[in-house]
Structure formats: C-alpha cells, structure tokens
Image (spheres, rainbow, N blue to C red):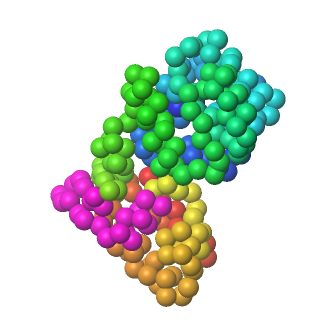
Amino acid sequence: MPTVLYVEDELFLGKIVKESLESRGFTVAMEDDGDRVLDLFRRTQPDICVLDVMLPHKDGFTLAREIRQLNTMVPILFLTAKTQTEDVLKGFAEGGNDYLRKPFSMEELIVRINNLLQLTGNGGIKKEDADNISLGRLQFNKPRQILSGGSEERKLSYRESELLLYLYEHRNQVIDRRDILNAIWGNDSFFNSRNLDVYITKLRGYLREDPSLEILTIKGVGYRFVL
C-alpha cells in the first residue's frame, strides 16, 4: 500500500485526514513540525508527500525544495489556505506537482493523491480497493452498501451505511451522540435520537459475525466502536 508523508500543524484536521486516508488503504506518516520532516522522509521513503504550506519553523515550500534535493521524483501535493496566484506559482517552482486549497473534501484529496501516484508510477489505490473497508473479518463496500464476510452478504440501507462509515472513521474513540446525530441526520431531535438507537442495534446484529468488533454504549455520552 502507498505511504503518504503528511505534514500538518492543525492537529484536529491532521487526525481526521490521517484516519480517512488510512481507512482507504494508505499508510500515513504524519508530522506537525517542519524541522522534523526530512528525518521522517528519510526513514519512511514515502510514495507521495502532502505538505501544508504554513508550518512552524519551516514552511511547506522550503520543505519541498529540500525534499527535491533528496528525491527528484516523489510527487508533492501542497495544502494551503493561501489563494494568491503567486503562491500557487511559487509552489510549482519549488517542485510541487499539485496544489489543493483549504477547505477541501477528502474525496478530492484522495483523487488527487491517486492521480499523482499513477502519473509518477508510484502506484495508487485502485478504485475497487479504495471502496472496500476491512472491519476485522468483515468487508464493507461503501458504494454498493454491502457488508460481507462470515456466513452471508448483507445489503445495508443508506442510513446504516453512513452510520457504519462514521463509526469506522472515529473507531476506538468515544463519540458524542449529538455529533453522530448532526453528522448523519442533520439535527439531534428526539425522533432522530430514537432512530439512532434502532440503527445501533441493527449494526450490532450485523457485526456479530466477528466477536472482535463492538459498539460500546458510553453512558451519558455516546458510543465507542472498538475495532
């Protein structure tokens, strides 16, 4: 699987992006301090670098220039809130291959990463592989909304699929009920809260095929998906 060197000093955003990339089959080496990036680059020998431009101690443009001295072929994708044309041109001048402005969608980031990997011959996650998520002994295909493994293949509803994906993306974390409701249903009304209880029960039934998978109820808070 391709290795992504991801440099981002916004830790909350970094955690979301890292977990999302890992859920799609990438290995992610993450750093938040520009001074430590070259050492991580040497140790991991990544297939692609995703660099935030604004970083402490050493900005993304400087890092790209230094990375290019070590490796002229590895693709470099810049992430930045800067929108000026001169910043974009500077990024390309320093050795960047692509430029994605914040805020961005994960789907666009993944498409751009895969395109760069394929263009440079470093591989990339095939679409069919990116569509499949491993849940222990089970496999979840998001576009087809199918959970397979064990004794059967089960077609999930749209809501079941979205909830399962949300739990997976926040796996091994305590998730507030309100966050789930707002993300999946759009509000935390009493009616939607009861629906959430029903869907959690359904998903627990579907995941019984693998005893290592659990959706734990954290009383007074929400849930924790143990994987």
Q: Residue at x 44, y 81 (%)?
A: 195
Q: Outermost residue, right direction?
A: 57
Question: Where is residue 191 drawn, in percent x and y?
Answer: 49, 88
What span is in magenta? 144-166
Residue 146 magenta-drawn? Answer: yes
Residue 20 magenta-drawn? Answer: no
**Number of residue marks:** 0
Q: Please say whether residue 122 is visible from this viewpoint.
A: no
Q: Which residue is drawn at 70% across and 28% down?
A: 90
Q: Residue at x 67, y 22 (%)?
A: 94
Q: Please say whether residue 164 is visible from this viewpoint.
A: yes
Q: Outermost residue, left direction?
A: 151
Q: Outermost residue, bottom direction?
A: 191
Question: Where is residue 121 drawn, in percent x and y?
Answer: 40, 22
- Up the image or down, 64 lies above or below 20; here it is above
Work out whether residue 83 or residue 210 is closer to the camera in this orientation and state it.
83
- Up the image or down, 55 lies above or below 221; here it is above
Question: Where is residue 127 drawn, in percent x and y?
Answer: 33, 42
- Up the image or down, 127 lies above or below 95; here it is below
- Up the image or down, 129 lies above or below 37; here it is below
Q: Outermost residue, front direction?
A: 85
Left or right: 40 in relation to 169? right
Q: Residue at x 45, y 56 (%)?
A: 168
Quarter of the image with the N terminus in it:
top left
Work out whether residue 202 or residue 144 is closer to the camera in this orientation and state it.
144
Question: Where is residue 95 drawn, in percent x and y?
Answer: 62, 21
Left or right: 7 in relation to 216? right
